[in-house]
């Protein structure tokens, strides 16, 4: 032990002496970045918010428009936050915010804001010149004005109904029924304590990661395992319970599986204690959940409530992807823990499963270690891993599959039986849950036959490895193919026989349908209109899907990251994919990957058309019709480990010596994301 410690100290000293100036410079930059970030968000961090939570309407604040609202004050406050929009465009205008005491006429805020500095659909905080309370002012008056040209101004949100009793909202002197989307902020002891705990954890652990990168330089499987643990535990705490997409359903599935593990008579019956969702909100991060964590985490277990039956049945779902979460719940129940502790332990077990997958993947891939490491620890992946979502299961296994694909393609050693069985089991685990992700196992056909010993062995082994995906694909596509052939036969023969009784030229709408959602028969009856619907959906949603796939939208797709963070993460991923590697994928491999991603994407979109898309949905006027519903950008996240290596080439490469700087930038960007998530949550 002493020898290892001495070797570690020698390594740190050697790396510091060798790179003294860059190390000191990066550490100074890190401290400056931390201080600047915390200072920038100081008006919202650690504070509670109350007020209008509805954003029903938006009006553009431009020349000739004046917004004025008088809002009563019922409690002490330090600042207000108003929600603005940018209309997802570049704007050159500016506007003025003036807030006064309605009684004293004392100016509390007078600020000019450039529209280009705003984030779309986000609150902006305005700090009062002094803390006010009802004994000082009975109300405040908020005035918004602008000299911006139409099409260059900010959008201002307001509600349809009153949120503040006795308030008066006027737009160009016309009294409105609702209120501005405005929230009052004030210091909160519990939230401030939570903020100090989280930010201390983040600053300390992220600093240690930077020191690890600069001074110790461990193997990437060790480094990214540490990063995954630190980032994962951070998102485990700051992303509030039930806010991750469908987390309520996944939690209840895990509860049912825990009942099976504990031998319960009815797996759908649980004590009401475990469904105590107080201070939690589905698909939305709210600060009340932070307060509950601080005040209720040590509350004694209470099993004197009534038994309730869960709405969803895990027997109708794919069970294995909920095993880690269910194990955590079972352990917590055996320890007699309350609902909140039980919930967080279930999340923790899911995170542990993902961290193990990241370690296995980075350890085994001979190339793209930096790229896969950064990808696997992006905020979107860590959020899903630190929740009850089965995306953790899919994402973790995806990285393992591509890691062994790279190993088999570029290593010289023969494939061992143990390794082959492991890869087969992993492929068998992922294929049934969503066949579109299992499709990528067909890339194992690119493994050279020398790795198997002979061409015959390669064919047999690859058929075995891809068998789970082929089986699932056959189950999915064979009935569809049969129905297509039958429909063609009917159109060619039966309809000719019955031509007098069937009018094939009738206009049956955008897609002829019966029921609430589109069906496969509708698609076959009107294939050109189905294609038109598909193309319209791609035009409308492709950009959103792309950005969301690597993490623009967190929480329940309601927490939209600032544009500069999203673009910075994208640039970092591209730079990581251009890193100098010992091998580069062939052009044919890249073409096949692109083709498979397109095919898998079309399967996903088609599946959502016939299983999710409502017939009577609202028409998107600017696009000339409805779109396919239910598709989220995170569904495309498992494609990223296959797509980003496409940028790797032999002509343009980034030297490995820049790895520490890319990693430093990555840690800094995640720190910015964490602080933004905290700021957003304290607003809600």
Image: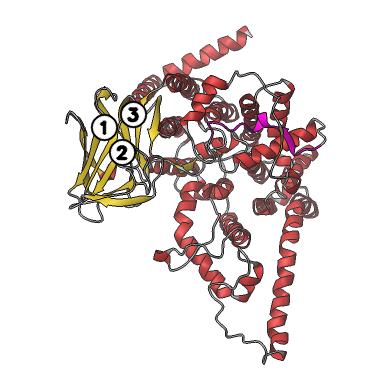
Question: Is the N terminus in the top left, top right, bottom left or bottom right quadrant?
Answer: top right
Label 1, label 2: how far apart the Cα atoms are: 10 Å
Give residue 139's mark: 1
Residue 16: in magenta span: no
Between 631 and 468, the one nearer to me in the picture? 631
Reply above or below: 229 against 494. above
Find the residue positioned furthest to the top.
2
Q: Which mark is residue 74?
A: 3
Between the residue at mark 3 and the residue at mark 2, the CA separation in whole angstroms equals 11 Å
Q: Residue at x 69, y 73 (%)?
A: 484
Q: Nearer the viewer, residue 669 or 62?
A: 62
The residue beneath circle 2 is 166
Of labels 3 and 2, earlier in sequence is: 3
Dot 1 falls on a residue whose secondary structure is strand
Mark 3–mark 2 contact, CB under 8 Å? no
Whichever of callouts 1 and 3 sits on the residue coming sooner in the sequence is 3
Secondary structure under the numbered disc 2 in the rendered image: loop
Apparent side of residue 82 relative to residue 144 in the rendered image (left or right): right
| Residue sticking out furthest to the front | 166
Labels 1 and 2: the sequence-earlier one: 1
Q: Residue 674 falls in which quadrant of the image?
A: top left
Q: Nearer the viewer, mark 3 or mark 2?
A: 2
* Residue 421 position within the rendered picture, expressed as x and y whole percent measured from the top left: 78, 41
Instruction: Identify which residue is drawn at 79% across, 35% down.
Output: 260
Q: Is residue 440 visible?
A: yes
Tell me the magenta residue range: 266-280
- Residue 553 is left or right of residue 145, and the answer is right
């Amino acid at each position: 032990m002493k020898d290892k410690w001495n070797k570690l100290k020698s390594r740190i000293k050697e790396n510091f002496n060798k790179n003294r100036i860059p190390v000191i410079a990066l550490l100074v930059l890190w401290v400056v970045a931390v201080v600047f970030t915390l200072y920038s968000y100081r008006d919202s961090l650690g504070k509670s918010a109350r007020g209008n939570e509805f954003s029903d309407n938006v009006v553009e604040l431009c020349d000739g428009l004046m917004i004025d609202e008088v809002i009563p004050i019922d409690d002490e406050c330090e600042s207000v936050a108003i929600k603005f929009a940018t209309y997802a465009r570049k704007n050159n205008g500016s506007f003025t915010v003036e807030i006064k005491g309605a009684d004293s006429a004392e100016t509390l805020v007078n600020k000019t804001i450039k529209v280009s500095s705003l984030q779309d659909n986000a609150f902006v905080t305005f700090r009062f010149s002094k803390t006010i309370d009802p004994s000082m002012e009975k109300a405040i008056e908020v005035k918004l004005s602008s000299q911006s040209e139409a099409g260059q101004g900010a959008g201002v949100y307001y509600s349809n109904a009153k949120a503040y009793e006795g308030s008066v909202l006027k737009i160009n002197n016309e009294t409105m029924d609702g209120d501005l989307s405005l929230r009052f902020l004030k210091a909160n002891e519990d939230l401030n304590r939570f903020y100090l705990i989280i930010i201390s954890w983040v600053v300390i652990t992220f600093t240690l990661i930077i020191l690890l990168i600069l001074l110790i330089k461990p193997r990437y499987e060790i480094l990214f395992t540490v990063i995954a643990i630190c980032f994962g535990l951070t998102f485990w705490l700051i992303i509030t319970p039930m806010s991750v997409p469908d987390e309520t359903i996944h939690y209840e599935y895990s509860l049912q599986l825990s009942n099976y593990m504990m031998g319960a008579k009815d797996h759908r019956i649980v004590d009401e204690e475990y469904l105590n969702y107080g201070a939690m909100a589905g698909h939305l991060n709210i600060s009340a959940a932070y307060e509950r964590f601080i005040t209720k985490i040590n509350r004694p277990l209470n099993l004197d409530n009534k038994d309730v039956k869960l709405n969803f049945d895990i027997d109708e779902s794919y069970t294995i992807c909920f095993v880690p979460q269910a194990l955590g719940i079972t352990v917590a129940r055996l320890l007699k823990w309350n609902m909140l502790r039980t919930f967080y332990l279930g999340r923790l077990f899911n995170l542990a499963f993902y961290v193990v997958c990241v370690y296995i993947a980075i350890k085994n891939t001979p190339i793209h270690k930096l790229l896969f490491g950064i990808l696997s620890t992006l905020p979107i992946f860590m959020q899903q891993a630190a929740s009850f979502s089965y995306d953790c299961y899919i994402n973790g296994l995806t990285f393992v599959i591509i890691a062994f694909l790279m190993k088999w393609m570029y290593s010289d050693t023969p494939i061992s039986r143990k390794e082959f069985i492991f890869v087969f089991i992993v492929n068998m685990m992922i294929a049934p849950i969503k066949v579109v992700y299992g499709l990528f196992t067909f890339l194992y056909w690119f493994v050279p036959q020398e790795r198997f010993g002979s061409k015959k062995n390669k064919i047999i082994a690859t058929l075995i490895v891809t068998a789970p995906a082929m089986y699932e694909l056959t189950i999915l596509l064979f009935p569809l193919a049969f129905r297509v052939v039958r429909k063609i036969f009917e159109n060619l023969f039966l309809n000719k026989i019955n031509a007098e009784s069937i009018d094939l030229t009738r206009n049956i709408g955008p897609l002829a349908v019966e029921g609430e959602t589109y069906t496969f028969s509708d698609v076959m009856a009107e294939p050109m209109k189905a294609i038109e619907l598909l193309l319209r959906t791609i035009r409308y949603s492709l950009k959103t899907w792309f950005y969301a796939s690597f993490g623009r939208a967190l929480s329940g797709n309601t927490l939209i990251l600032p544009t500069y963070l999203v673009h910075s993460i994208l640039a970092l991923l591209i730079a990581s994919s251009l890193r100098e590697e010992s091998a580069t994928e062939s052009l044919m491999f890249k073409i096949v990957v692109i083709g498979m991603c397109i095919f898998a994407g079309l399967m996903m979109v088609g599946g959502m058309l016939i299983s999710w898309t409502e017939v009577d949905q609202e028409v998107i006027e600017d696009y000339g019709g409805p779109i396919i519903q239910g598709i989220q950008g995170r569904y495309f996240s498992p494609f990223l480990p296959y797509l980003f290596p496409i940028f790797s080439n032999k002509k343009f490469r980034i030297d490995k010596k820049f790895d520490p700087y890319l990693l430093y930038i990555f840690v800094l960007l995640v720190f910015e994301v964490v602080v933004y998530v905290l700021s957003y949550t304290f607003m809600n």
